[in-house]
Image (tube, rainbow, N blue to C red):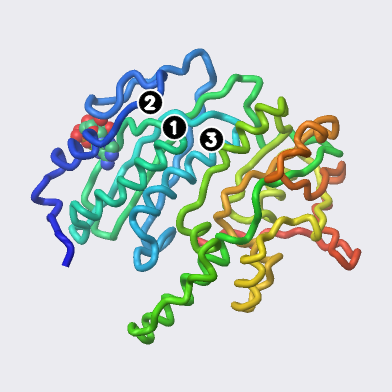
Amino acid sequence: MENRTELSALGEFGLIRRIQENTNLKNAETIKGIGDDAAVLSTAGQELLISTDLLIEGIHFDLSYAPLRHLGYKAIAVNVSDIAAMNGIPKQVTVSLGLSNRFSVEAIDELYEGIQVACENYKVDLVGGDTSASRSGLVISVTVTGLAAKDEIVYRNTAKPNDIICVTGDLGAAFMGLQALEREKQVYLANPDMKPELEEKDYVVLRQLKPEARMDMIHELKEAGVIPTSMIDISDGLASEILHLCRQSGTGANLFEDKIPIDDQTYLVATELNFSPLTAALNGGEDYELLFTIRQDDYEKIKHITDITTIGYMTADPATVQMVMKSGTAVAVTSPGFEHF
Ligand code: ADP
Ligand code: MG
């Protein structure tokens, strides 16, 4: 048995002090972090970006296969991804928790280890939060702030016809990771003596449990001197996100099936579990890659960046968002809608 310290032994203030002691501030824009009635932040003359995400046990994560350390990391990463998608630099986060007495102090320590590692990686400061009892499992709400110069912010509604559509990394892996984990869970529930078979699925499983925000790509684009004409992060699948860009920009799009980046392991796992890899890329979620458009003139500046793939171009007809298949036929891109409801 592992050590188990009840949360009640520490109390809310003890828990907050424990979190505060493990927090170090990195950014000059953070004037005051945890410990007062409000954090004090400087915008250093730039525009302030702010975004929030809510993660609820049983809806957004399943603790039977999501380690708390990874969950903490993911909660920060998905928020940082929203700042990346605005072409901003993340600076601070707040983390609010709803906790049931099912959780021990050691479990919360694990969650915060993941949070702290993500804060180090993305160079953000944990500056506050709130802590409450919960009757319905674990609730994690993260708010992230970021900064960007006014003329560097990238919106969803500013793509133009003929802009080149680009995507970072590869797509569909996080969805196939989720399917693999769900299947192992069912196998385990049916027979707890079965050893999980996830070794050859390590990449897709990690993409699901511990996604990365592509801040590295934001820095690459800045170094290349390119400001995208529109951008969004891929949380709900390529189909849904390209439709957002097109709808808001008043454009159409031509995508090419043979250009969609899909990892070999995603192909293998999809084939094994009877999914179409292309459907995983289009309608699966949680890849947290960036989908963006650039002016044709800027293509030369980014073509050396290996983790960026051009997958199509924007068109003038907002009624036609389509994918040209390998066979040559074009099919309309549609969104599957809101899975969570
Ligand atoms: P208040 O009563 O004003 O809400 P709290 O006692 O809840 O104050 O919080 C005290 C300090 O600890 C504040 O700076 C708050 O932002 C911070 N804090 C509270 N809960 C958390 C948490 N889960 N993670 C990080 N900081 C927290
Ligand atoms: Mg409070």
Task: State the residue in front, 161 or 250.
Answer: 161
Numbered disc in front, either 3 or 2: 2
* Pointer 1 residue Cβ closer than 8 Å to ligand 1: no
Numbered disc in front, either 1 or 3: 1
Residue corresponding to mark 1: 123
Q: Amino acid at mark 2?
A: Lys
Q: Are marks 1 and 2 in contact (CB under 8 Å)?
A: yes
Q: Amino acid at mark 1?
A: Lys
Q: CA distance from mark 3 to mark 2?
A: 18 Å
State the image coordinates of residue 125 (x, y, percent, origin top left): 37, 31
State the image coordinates of residue 159 (x, y, percent, origin top left): 76, 36
Residue corresponding to mark 2: 26
Q: CA distance from mark 1 to mark 2?
A: 7 Å
Q: Amino acid at mark 3?
A: Ile
Residue 280 in the figure: left or right of residue 50: right
Secondary element at tag 3: helix
Residue at 61% from the left image edge and 78% from the top image edge:
272
Q: CA distance from mark 1 to mark 3?
A: 13 Å
Give the image quarter of residue 36: top left
Q: In which quadrant of the rendered image does the N terminus lie? A: bottom left
